[in-house]
């Protein structure tokens, strides 16, 4: 199984421009006939794809961490307001 075309398809889902994807597909090629032909270009395309994957992986990890922190704060606020409302009902 080739990882290059799968990674390019995944980048298309992320919203990477069609021109960039077309260039990557052109450089990588779907099925290389001769491995020695344009080897440096193919390696460069693969490095670009993997670099893009690493950037998106880091971005999604940071977003997940940030969203988890926000959710914890919101849950704490909900519990705090709920307890406050119960106490307000008891006092009244």
Image (spheres, rainbow, N blue to C red):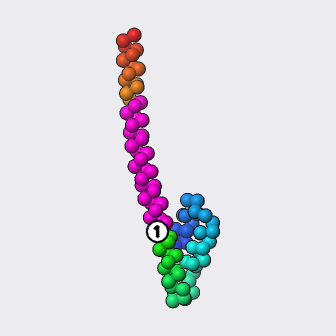
Left or right, residue 41 beside residue 61: right
Q: Is residue 3 visible?
A: no
Compared to 20, does 87 lie above or below? above
**Is 54 in the magenta?**
yes
- Furthest residue to the top? 92
Rendered residue at 36%/17% (across/down)? 87
Front position in the image: 82 or 22 = 22
Which quadrant would residue 79 be assigned to in this image? top left
Quadrant of the image occupied by residue 90: top left
Start-end of magenta stretch: 52-78
> Magenta stretch: residue 50 in it?
no
Kindly report the secondary structure that dominates the magenta region of the rendered protein: helix
Residue 10 in view (yes/no):
yes
Residue 48 spot, x, y in % from top left: 50, 72
Task: Tell me where residue 50 appears, x and y as whole percent.
Answer: 47, 70
Looking at the rendering, in which quadrant would you find the C terminus?
top left
In this rendering, position of residue 2 left or right of residue 77: right
Rendered position, 26 above or below 20 = below
- What SS does tag 1 mark? helix
Place of residue 34 in the rendered image (x, y in percent of width and height, measured from the top left): 55, 88
- Crowding at dot 1, Cα within 10 Å, few <14 / some 14-19 / many 20+, comes out as few
- Please name the residue shown 54% across and 86% down the image: 38
Q: Which residue has dot 1 on it?
A: 51
| Residue for point 42% across, 40% down | 71
Q: Residue 61: horizontal and vertical position, in percent?
A: 42, 55
Number of dots carrying numbers? 1
Q: Residue at x 36, y 12 (%)?
A: 91
């Amino acid at each position: 199984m080739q990882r290059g075309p799968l990674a390019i398809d995944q980048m298309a889902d992320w919203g990477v421009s069609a021109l960039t994807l077309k260039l990557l597909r052109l450089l990588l090629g779907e099925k290389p006939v001769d491995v020695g032909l344009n080897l440096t270009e193919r390696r460069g395309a693969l490095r670009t794809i993997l670099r893009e994957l690493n950037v998106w992986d880091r971005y999604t990890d940071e977003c997940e961490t940030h969203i988890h922190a926000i959710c914890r704060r919101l849950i704490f606020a909900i519990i705090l307001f709920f307890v406050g409302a119960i106490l307000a009902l008891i006092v009244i």
